[in-house]
Image: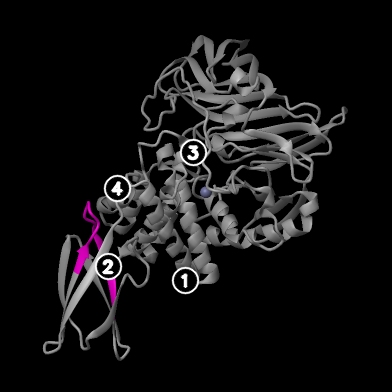
Amino acid sequence: MQALVFVLFSCTVQLYFSQPTFSLDTYPKNPDINIISYDFYLKLHDVTDSIKGVAVLDIKTKDQPLAQFELDLINVNESLKGHGMHVDSVLISSPNTYSTKFLHKKNRLAIVLEEEIAANTYFSATVFYRGIPHDGLIISNNKFGDRTFFGDNWPNRARHWLPSIDHPYDKAFCTFSVETPIHYEVVASGTKIEESFTNNNSKITRWESQAPLATKLMVIGVAKFAVQHLAEVDHIPVQSWVFPENKVAGFYDYAMAPEILAFFNAKIGPFAYAKLANVQSKTRYGGMENASNIFYYENSVTGQRTIENLIAHEVAHQWFGDAVTEADWHHVWLSEGFATYFTNVYVEHKHGKDSMNRLLNKQKIQIAEYHKKAPTSSIIDLKVNKLTDLLNTNTYQKGAWVLHMLRYELGDELFFKGIKKYYQIFKNGNALTKDFQYVMEEVSGKSLDWFFEQWLYSPTLPSVKTAYKYNKRNKTLELTITQTQATKLFTYRLAVLFISDNEERVFKEFNIDKRENRFEISLKNKPDKIVSDPYNNLLLYVE
Ligand SMILES: [Zn+2]
């Protein structure tokens, strides 16, 4: 996602029944079940913010028999002004259908089974619930005064309105059947498979996702919309959904999407979803990469095409973050660093290398500024407890720079070959950083431990100073390249450009791995100027 302004949001303190089992983050992953699909029915009203929900979860047990399991669902709570969800009943089908006991407290719904379910067995659980969502499903008026409903789940706010395993590690298929008064249009993940008017002035709209999704990306958008079926890109329908008052400007702005989609489709691999909708919404973020329907903030529509980079960022997320999802929150750079870098790559393709370099330089400055504020923070930073704190300059801009440096290290051909392979292997699944490293090592035949360690796990930023002495008689140059950061030595290949009085330009690369690195090279003319890293390949601060 892209922050609207870089304000970090406070997050609800979660109290869990059980302790973390095997994860690095504190979410109590459930090793005993796998959610295969969610089928949500939701009834929305004009006269009340209270929603009624029925969630049918198809579940498979893993290697152990199952006696009970837990889902996330925010319960009705005084501290939420009486908002939250109340569960009326839970049905189990395995295969006999029976109403079962449950305990709903501390925002966890513990479902107790009457009979143990055998290992490796499919069963379903149906949760009947209702209440006013305190968050997650944002019920409010848009800037034109019209009532709207927008899912806004990142990172773990689906649990405010959807009983679920609300963590990206357990992806599942999802279907939304949304019953609304007839004047609403409904957009959701996947393909629209039904729109039926009922006999009580309401209608049911049903959308189905044919690919498994993380709960952070499962949403509905319900509003009065103007809808444009804009284009088909490699058989993928691209649509714009904007508020009717913004129709002309919105259709114009969002029409930048097909070109971006086509570029990433060719560059990374086939798009994972049935459509791409760009939706004007009430998301708290600048843009939120919900799978197959990106939600943008409502003032994203200007009629001036001011959000090309934002669209590129969110579309890039459909590959990275959505189709390939981090298995653990601390690896969120696999979403944000990738989306940031692939925006750079799109800008390079569309507007040229200089434009990409301007972005890289800006990002380099942002990284240095952030480092001053948080000198011990790295991209993969296990010290971070609050999920919203993971959205920072390290996971976005520095993550992007890591990919840029990896591209330099491997060369364009191997880098993009590796990216394609990583996408192909982990598409519709989950990955950790080591999975990405493994693919890039396999494709390049190089060990990259040193690279990932120094750039992703270490907080240090390298800086460098060069000095030289030219010997006219021998026509040689003694070059000293000194790493000047206080701690930690880095390994990298530094390009240096020697420019002499008569405009002669000589380009050489040097392997740097010590504090002080000395080289002697032959050079016809005394250089007037030397430029370290002239092509902006390293996140290196030249003194
Ligand atoms: Zn993002």
Element type where label 1 sits in the image = helix
Looking at the figure, which quarter contains the C terminus? bottom left
Q: CA distance from mark 1 to mark 3?
A: 33 Å
Residue type marked 2: Leu
Mark in front: 1 vs 3: 3
Q: Residue at x 35, y 46 (%)?
A: 378
Q: Earlier in the sequence, mark 2 or mark 1?
A: 1
Disc assigned to residue 458: 4
Would you name the residue on which mark 2 appears?
A: 494
Residue type marked 3: Thr
Dot 3 alpha-carbon crowd within 10 angstroms: few under 14, some 14 to 19, many 20 or more: some
Residue 470 placement: quadrant: bottom left
Find the magenta span and give its range: 481-498
- Left or right of 94? Residue 418 is left
Residue type marked 4: Ser
Answer above or below: position of 497 versus 140.
Answer: below
- Percent across and percent down for residue 131 are 68, 22
- Left or right of 9? Residue 279 is right
Residue 311 placement: quadrant: bottom right
Would you name the residue on which mark 1 appears?
A: 353
Q: Earlier in the sequence, mark 2 or mark 3?
A: 3
Q: Is residue 425 visible?
A: no
Mark in front: 2 vs 3: 3
Q: CA distance from mark 2 to mark 1?
A: 20 Å
Q: Residue at x 57, y 59 (%)?
A: 309
- Percent across and percent down for residue 147 are 77, 38
Would you name the residue on which mark 3 appears?
A: 388
Beta carbon at label 3 within 8 Å of ligand 1:
no
Q: Earlier in the sequence, mark 1 or mark 3?
A: 1
